[in-house]
Image: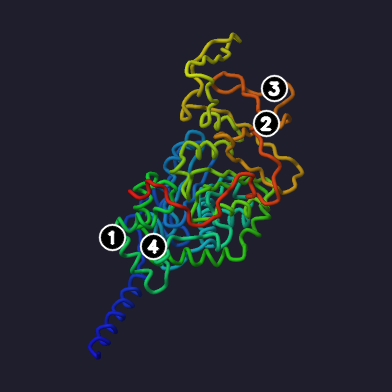
Amino acid sequence: MGITLIVLFVAVAVILAASVALGRDAREVESARDTEYLELEGTWIRYNVIGGGPAVVLVHGWLSSSRIWEQLAGRLAQRFTVYTLDLSGFGESDKPLSGYGIRNGSRLLYAFCAHFGLTRTNIIGHDLGGAMAVKLAADHPDVVGRLVLIATPADENQIDLPTMLWLVTVPVVGPIFYALGRVARPIRRLWMRPFVADSDDLTEIVVDDAGRSTPAAVSKTLSISRRELSRGRLARQARIIKIPLLVVSGEEDQIVDPQSVGAWAGGVDKSEICLIDECGHLPMIERIAEFNAQILAFLTGDARYLDYVNPAPETSDEAETHYVDEAGDTQPSTDTTGPPDDTVDLSPRPTVFEAERDNVPRVVRKHGGRYPARIPPPQAYPDDQEEPPTSSGRARREPSDEDFLPELPEDLFDWPETRREFGPRERREDDDTS
């Protein structure tokens, strides 16, 4: 019995020593090139700038990096100057022992925007990166012009991690579990599988980024952010935001409760909610075209971007449509979808918000497989200017009753159709093979 106790004691001591050593792991950038790195708040931050036009800053979330924005950044770069960065502790930026959480992340974003002289810029934040963007907009209203929050928790209770990933954040043994996941890709795939609704959408970039941090960055970012979100502190501070706000969430999100959208949008006057069906925590990689169109429509105020994601259905396989050419003559056409989305050059329309609102956000939600069109009020155009046609030359489709939501109930999520409560969902049949 004595030998058994000694062996057990030694094993526990080794585990504790390893946990402490791994928990104090810190990393610095070895070769910081001026064209790719900035020293902000005493930390080397990896960044990238592409495109040209008004500025857009993309902020990734927990256990991720700026690589998650590759599809959206490439699309936005056609009309905007897109800034991406790896937050402290993630991606290819420095990974110090401290300096994590929403408050510190907001300070980093402010220093980033100040370095490039950005004011009234568009900021898009995912997950905890969205919470950092909210804090920035509340503390520095002159920096943020438009704000997009994607799967962003408004309270600590709205974060629900899978068991395998929760073990990484547990004190003492968490660093050991994270070290195992860093060297074993199958473990990282188990971590990230619940982040998407369909296992086929889980990309290698997402899996790789989950193992590029340190135990201190992973655990402290989450634990400190939970305290800062507790009791809805940040959501209450967000009520002072006076800028246009779009809140996006996947209806199948198992990491952040989709009902968080109501907490963010409910207190902001100029707000919209977009719920994407059959989508999990990562709409930027699960529903690329649909997500990009929603972002572009919001940033530019032009709903025509959505027309190419949801083309009008044909009445028959050989149905012939018509368009009006430059001379005003009607010509036959078999194209019902218009030019590819990546080649459309649409002029932005001003977004006009009502002067008085009852604080009920506009909800953008699919009905019959289509999103309702964002139809600007008549005063959005001068009296002598007609509403511009679509880029393909076809006359705009007149809205029908199906394009509008019924009167909003007091509870934004009390929809007529049956909705499942947030929580564990049944896996799809194809998940058994993943």
How far apart are the alpha carbons under marks 3 and 2? 26 Å
Decide: marks 1, 2 in contact (CB < 8 A)? no
Q: Type of residue at label 3? A: Gln
Q: Type of residue at label 1? A: Val
How far apart are the alpha carbons under marks 4 and 3? 59 Å
Name the residue nearer the viewer: 261 or 105. Answer: 261
Q: Earlier in the sequence, mark 4 or mark 1?
A: 4
The label nearer to you, 4 versus 1, is 4
Q: Residue furthest right?
A: 356
- Disc 1 crowd, CA 10 A, few/some/many (<14, 14-19, 20+): few
How far apart are the alpha carbons under marks 2 and 4? 46 Å
Please identify the quadrant where the N terminus is shown: bottom left
Look at 58% across and 19% down and name the residue there.
Answer: 394
How far apart are the alpha carbons under marks 4 and 1? 15 Å
Tag 4 residue: 164
Q: Total marks drawn?
A: 4
Per the image, label 2 sits on a secondary structure element best described as helix
Per the image, label 1 sits on a secondary structure element best described as helix
Image quarter for residue 213? bottom left
Kindly tell me whether residue 146 is visible in this rendering. no
Tag 1 residue: 183
Decide: marks 1, 3 in contact (CB < 8 A)? no
- Disc 4 crowd, CA 10 A, few/some/many (<14, 14-19, 20+): some
The label nearer to you, 1 versus 3, is 1
